């Protein structure tokens, strides 16, 4: 049973819809990340689920409850969704505890009263902020503010929590820490989460499911592994990670290209499986290009190292083939490589082939 | 949290339609503020077309128009410059007794222009015509620029100036690139208030014998008993006001609040005066001295030398003070209630309808009090005759007259409440109305209070509409003052003048923001 | 929000209290002494100074037992107000600073016709021609001159002389002022349209100093900024009372027999909306009674219009002035005067 279910949701005017028919099912208790370039509609999707934006058509359900259908619109305050915005949006006139208590009654006075209750204490403990209960938002760090925002959202026992780029303004270390914390918290509370982020790595590493959007459409929805390893097209592949695209010709489970004869799988729509001799685009992840003297491999080619980008745990090596084609390869250790050095490279594992763009 | 510019993500177009309830309330408020305009149109439509044409063709008309426009333009520009300089000195400079200077800068608001003119003319009888009016209106209206600009500088950041300096620009250019964009909306809103105020001003220009449209309107009522003529002149004022309002809207453009982080602390770097110390203090002293010090002391001097010093009736003075306070407070509340829907709409939504509603809200401010007063006589007799000449209609009149003064302050304070706070409240179970009440209004409260105080201080000084609409037999400080200056009995007028200035100083003090204390100082 | 609600509540309460306080107290009519049909109450619009009229009203109440509620504002504002109110006006009588305001109300049919035995008390030329309003006091037009620079003997005996180029920039007057306009009307009636136009043209070309009010005109003469000012006589007496006669640099020249020395009147009328309340009539009768007339003479130095009451000292006799040939409230004539002034850029 899916917890959140969207069916053909359209938002915006006819001429320029912001969401062009989104259909999506997120299982109960899962954390789903929504990624896409700026302006693709991912924040609007989140606001539409929360009820802050009205859908023009389509259906939205949370659990068994209908949120929107045929232009009928359930007000956001009746949806029981938690909302954690990018800027944390803590009420500046309330203390940390009062912020957390804000949804437990209507008005500042109710919040003040609820702030002294056990539930608020439990939530503050959950986000490890018990010591800061009486601080004002202006006295908090960015990470602390986001934790308060999360506790505040959880206070009303939502069935689903919507997180709109909550880690965007944090530094990388804090970000990773908080990410893990949020994930654990949501899991512990058994709450379904939707996380909008512009950071693909964050999406792939944190979420149970990833939704890739572009131009108001949902391009692909799946587990991080599916998205990374079985992208539905080269654009999705390129968006969720580095990729090399090579033109070639389909030949019965292989692709003939500048790299030689590469083992390939058809990645496009099943209705369009190519026939031999048909031109295709071949997708290779950088880690599929193995460097070094490995003459035994079937598809090996020579190239020159052009750039080296040191990333700590791995190195991205820029390559140029004899015909000028540029590629990148990811290696665990650069070894003795340096710019200008000749290398031999080979392809590991099957590559994905798509119809040429 | 570190300081950074938060991009306000442009929300999708389709969802940006204002809620019907807000739109309806704003249209209602707008209809109320259009009462004077409707009245004028009714009056003008009573005149024959050739009569209207002959009135417009009067030889004096071009001169009246030119005088009016040149006074509006020059006073607005000089108040803008003087107000910005004052605001800069008040906020960005290390001053001795900063709070005192802040209060002094707001104090001219407490002095009615006719009183200031009276004082100056008693001192320099020859101070008349354009230059006298220009001088006087500039000094009394400078606080309309000083206060919002000082608030904008206080709430902004000098970080952008610093960036500009590192990019190789001089301090003036850095100010232009860094600070000006932050204070521009406040400066424009203040200038609009000044321009509309000058347009509608009657008391001081009449005393300074500078013929403008408002004095011609007064003459039309006073000598010609020609209501149509007066209405046509008033419609010209409305047309000028409309041009000013549209001009301000265009100049304000699409600037939205983007400066200063939501959770960050605003940083204002203080400047030391060094060699500019004496000229700076002098500059700060000019406006309060000219607008408050000199006229008030001249009037007090007159009090001491007058031979016909009448016995001061303490009871009636007390009654007048109480009436003044009550009516001004009632007017402020009415004005704020009318201004809130318009300001909220203008702060949160755009589009042609929103712009039209906002501009209509401002129009009454360009009209002299007698026209607005008569329009409410017309309105209340037609709609609610039972309330005619009661305090309720008078406070309502204050609301219509001065609601525009509250719009700007409320609009900018609502615009400064991040919309993400409203989103959060909605998802936490607050209805639209509860969100508005417990979040937006709660956080915009300083601006709403400022708007109320601005209305209160103006209503206390208001005369022509008060004379027409006050309950028969009810006196305010302004009417008592008027009753005593009419027979050039300066001596008898002085206690009322002093009481009026003192009472009006209270909202002026609250408006100055001196109570809120010093700016968070950041070492430079 | 709580604070603002509290303020709203307070303000509303205050407003209500104010309304309550100011509502006319409905004291029962003093049965015996009042007129039989009167309700013992009178609502009055007063276009004159409160400090002047309030004590007079007190005397009236003392004498008659009629309670008066008065609204004070300038005559022009009250005139505009009465027009706006029409038949709905709460006012029963209007005491005006000038005849023109009464004439305009009369023309619009807003004034009741007064009984002939009342209107006949006041000599013709000082009251309405059609019996809709009553002249109360007179105000002579005079030339105020700067006694430090002008010899009393050199002051022109007629205003026609002021168009002489030697007085260029030396004459101040308030063309928008009702008394001034009445005087120009008088000039047209008495000396003919051509002479009047020649005078207006001559003055407009003689760099006049234009003011808003008579009081300002007198201030200019008193401070020596101009040599002559065209004003009403009593302004001088008021200033003299305030500042002391010795402090008066300006002195007055009266112009008997000249249009420039005509007399404007203050007057009163009864509004049609009053349903002919006898209390209103009683007030008008009181104004032209000996007691009422004496009060004005003492307090304002204006001419009493009731024959037999002595004028203030130093004023030329009322019958030496030109008024009997004029209808002071003839508004058609007034609008022609305004057109004339406008034609030469004075309005």
Image (spheres, coloured by chain):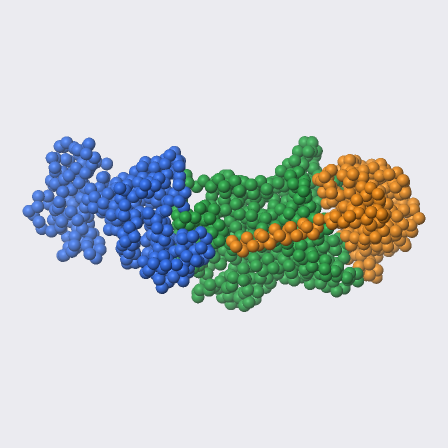
- Residue toward you, B142 or A237: A237
On the picture, is B423 further left or further right than B400? left
Q: Can the viewer see residue B130?
A: no
**Residue drawn 73% across and 41% down?**
C89
Image quarter (top left, top right, bottom left or bottom right) of the N terminus of chain B: bottom left
Q: Quadrant of residue B159?
A: bottom left
**Residue drawn 19% across and 38% down?**
A267
Judged from this view, the residue extending furthest toward the right is C308
On the image, the x and y values in percent for residue B14 come to 41, 39
- Residue toward you, A104 or B293: A104
Chain that is coloured green in the picture: B
**Residue drawn 13% across and 38% down?**
A255
Total marks in image: 0
On the picture, is B339 further left or further right than C107? left
Chain that is coloured blue in the picture: A
On the image, the x and y values in percent for residue B170 come to 45, 58
On the image, the x and y values in percent for residue A89 come to 40, 53
Q: Quadrant of residue A236?
A: top left
Q: Is residue C174 above or below residue A267?
A: below
Image quarter (top left, top right, bottom left or bottom right) of the C terminus of chain B: bottom left
Q: Can the viewer see residue B522?
A: yes
Q: Quadrant of residue A337?
A: bottom left
Chain that is coloured orange in the picture: C
On the image, the x and y values in percent for residue B308 come to 79, 61
**Residue drawn 54% across and 62% down?**
B515
On the picture, is C94 further left or further right than B380? right
């Amino acid at each position: 049973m899916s917890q959140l279910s969207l069916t053909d949701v359209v938002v915006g005017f006819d001429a320029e819809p912001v969401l062009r028919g989104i259909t999506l099912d997120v299982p109960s208790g899962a954390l789903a990340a929504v990624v896409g370039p700026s302006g693709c509609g991912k924040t609007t999707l989140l606001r539409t689920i929360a009820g802050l934006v009205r859908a023009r058509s389509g259906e939205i359900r949370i659990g068994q409850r209908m949120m929107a259908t045929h232009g009928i619109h359930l007000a956001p305050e009746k949806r029981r969704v938690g909302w954690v915005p990018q800027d944390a949006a803590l009420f500046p006139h309330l203390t940390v505890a009062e912020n957390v208590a804000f949804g437990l009654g209507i008005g500042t006075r109710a919040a003040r009263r609820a702030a002294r209750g056990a539930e608020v204490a439990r939530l503050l403990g959950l986000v490890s902020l018990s010591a800061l209960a009486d601080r004002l938002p202006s006295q908090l760090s960015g990470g602390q503010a986001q934790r308060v925002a999360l506790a505040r959202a959880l206070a009303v026992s939502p069935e689903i929590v919507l997180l709109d780029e909550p880690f965007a303004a944090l530094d990388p270390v804090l970000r990773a820490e908080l990410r893990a914390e949020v994930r654990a918290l949501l899991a512990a509370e058994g709450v379904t989460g939707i996380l909008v982020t512009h950071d693909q790595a964050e999406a792939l590493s944190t979420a149970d499911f990833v939704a890739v959007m572009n131009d108001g459409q949902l391009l692909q929805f799946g587990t991080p592994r599916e998205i990374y390893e079985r992208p539905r097209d080269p654009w999705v592949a390129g968006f969720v990670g580095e990729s090399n695209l090579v033109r070639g010709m389909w030949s019965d489970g292989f692709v003939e290209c500048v790299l030689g004869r590469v083992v390939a799988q058809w990645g496009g729509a099943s209705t369009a499986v190519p026939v031999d001799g048909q031109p295709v685009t071949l997708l290779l992840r950088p880690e599929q290009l193995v460097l070094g003297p490995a003459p035994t491999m079937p598809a090996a080619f020579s190239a020159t190292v052009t750039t080296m980008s040191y990333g700590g745990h791995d190195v991205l090596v820029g390559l140029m083939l004899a015909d000028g084609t540029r590629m990148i390869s990811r290696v665990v250790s650069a070894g003795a490589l340096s710019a200008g050095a000749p290398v031999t490279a080979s392809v590991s594992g099957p590559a994905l082939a798509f119809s040429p763009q | 949290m570190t300081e950074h510019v938060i991009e306000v993500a442009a929300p999708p177009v389709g969802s940006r339609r204002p809620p019907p309830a807000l739109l309806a309330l704003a249209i209602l408020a707008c209809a109320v503020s259009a009462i004077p305009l409707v009245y004028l149109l009714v009056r003008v439509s009573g005149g024959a077309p050739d009569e209207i044409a002959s009135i417009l063709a009067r030889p004096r008309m071009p001169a009246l128009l030119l005088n009016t426009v040149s006074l509006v333009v020059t006073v607005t520009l000089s108040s803008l410059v003087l107000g910005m300089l004052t605001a800069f000195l008040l906020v960005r400079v290390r001053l001795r007794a900063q709070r005192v200077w802040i209060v002094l800068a707001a104090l001219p608001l407490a002095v009615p222009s006719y009183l200031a003119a009276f004082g100056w003319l008693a001192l320099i009888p020859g101070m008349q015509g354009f230059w006298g009016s220009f001088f006087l209106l500039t000094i009394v209206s400078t606080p309309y620029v000083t206060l919002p600009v000082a608030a904008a500088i206080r709430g902004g950041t000098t970080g952008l100036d610093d960036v500009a300096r590192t990019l190789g620009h001089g301090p003036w250019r850095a100010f232009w690139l860094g600070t000006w964009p932050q204070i521009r909306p406040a400066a424009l809103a203040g200038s609009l208030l000044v321009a509309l105020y000058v347009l509608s001003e009657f008391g001081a220009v009449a005393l300074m014998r500078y013929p403008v449209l408002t004095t011609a309107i007064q003459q039309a009522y006073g000598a010609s008993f020609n209501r149509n003529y007066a209405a046509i002149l008033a419609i010209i004022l409305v047309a000028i006001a409309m041009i000013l309002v549209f001009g301000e809207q265009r100049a304000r453009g699409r600037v939205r609040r983007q400066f200063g982080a939501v959770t960050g602390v605003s940083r204002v770097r203080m400047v030391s005066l060094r060699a500019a110390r004496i000229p700076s203090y002098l500059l700060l002293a000019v406006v309060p001295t000219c607008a408050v010090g000199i006229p008030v002391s001249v009037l007090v001097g007159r009090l001491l030398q007058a031979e016909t010093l009448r016995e001061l009736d303490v009871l009636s003075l007390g009654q007048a003070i109480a009436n003044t306070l009550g009516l001004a407070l009632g007017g402020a509340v009415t004005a704020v209630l009318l201004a809130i829907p318009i300001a909220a709409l203008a702060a949160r939504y755009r589009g042609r309808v929103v712009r039209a509603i906002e501009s209509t809200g401002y129009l009454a401010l360009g009209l002299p009090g007698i026209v607005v007063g008569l329009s409410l006589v017309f309105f209340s007799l037609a709609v609610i005759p039972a309330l005619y000449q009661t305090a309720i209609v008078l406070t309502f009149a204050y609301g219509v007259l001065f609601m525009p003064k509250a719009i700007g302050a409320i609009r900018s304070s609502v615009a400064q409440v991040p919309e993400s706070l409203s989103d959060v409240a909605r998802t936490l179970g607050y209805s639209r109305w509860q969100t508005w009440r417990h979040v937006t209004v709660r956080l915009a409260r300083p601006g709403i209070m400022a708007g109320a105080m601005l209305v209160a201080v103006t209503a206390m000084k208001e005369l022509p509409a008060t004379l027409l609409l006050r309950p028969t037999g009810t006196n305010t400080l302004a009417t008592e003052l008027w009753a005593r200056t009419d027979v050039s009995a300066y001596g008898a007028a002085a206690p009322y003048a002093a009481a009026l200035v003192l009472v009006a100083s209270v909202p002026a003090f609250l408006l100055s923001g001196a109570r809120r204390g010093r700016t968070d100082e950041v070492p430079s | 929000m709580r604070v603002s609600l509290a303020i709203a509540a307070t303000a509303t309460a205050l407003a209500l209290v104010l309304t309550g306080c100011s509502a006319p107290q409905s004291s029962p009519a003093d049965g015996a002494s009042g007129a039989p049909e009167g309700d013992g109450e009178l609502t009055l619009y007063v276009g004159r100074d409160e400090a002047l009229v309030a004590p007079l009203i007190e005397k009236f109440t003392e004498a008659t037992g009629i309670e008066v509620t008065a609204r004070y504002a300038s005559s022009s504002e009250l005139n505009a107000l009465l027009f706006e109110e029409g038949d709905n006006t709460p006012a029963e009588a209007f005491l005006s600073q000038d005849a023109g305001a009464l004439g305009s109300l009369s023309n619009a049919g807003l004034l009741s016709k007064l009984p002939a035995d009342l209107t006949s008390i006041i000599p013709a030329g000082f009251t309405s021609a059609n019996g809709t309003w009553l002249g109360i006091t007179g105000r002579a037009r005079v030339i105020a001159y700067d006694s430090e620079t002008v010899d009393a003997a050199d002051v022109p005996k007629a205003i026609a002389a002021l168009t002489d180029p030697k007085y260029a920039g030396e004459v101040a007057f308030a063309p928008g002022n009702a008394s001034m306009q009445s005087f120009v009307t008088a000039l047209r009636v008495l000396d003919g349209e051509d002479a009047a136009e020649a005078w207006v043209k001559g003055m407009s070309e003689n760099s006049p100093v234009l003011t808003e009010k008579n009081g300002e005109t007198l201030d200019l003469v008193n401070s020596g900024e101009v040599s002559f000012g065209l004003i009403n006589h009593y302004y001088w007496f008021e200033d003299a009372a305030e500042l002391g006669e010795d402090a008066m640099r300006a002195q007055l020249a009266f112009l008997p027999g000249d249009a420039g020395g005509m007399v404007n009147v203050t007057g009163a009328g009864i509004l049609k909306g009053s349903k002919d309340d006898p209390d209103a009539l009683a007030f008008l009768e009181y104004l032209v009674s000996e007691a009422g007339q004496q009060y004005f003479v003492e307090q304002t130095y204006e001419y009493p219009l009731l024959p037999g009451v002595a004028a203030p000292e130093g004023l030329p006799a009322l019958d030496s002035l030109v008024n009997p040939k004029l209808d002071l409230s003839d508004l058609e004539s007034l609008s022609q005067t305004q057109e004339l002034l406008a034609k030469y850029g004075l309005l």
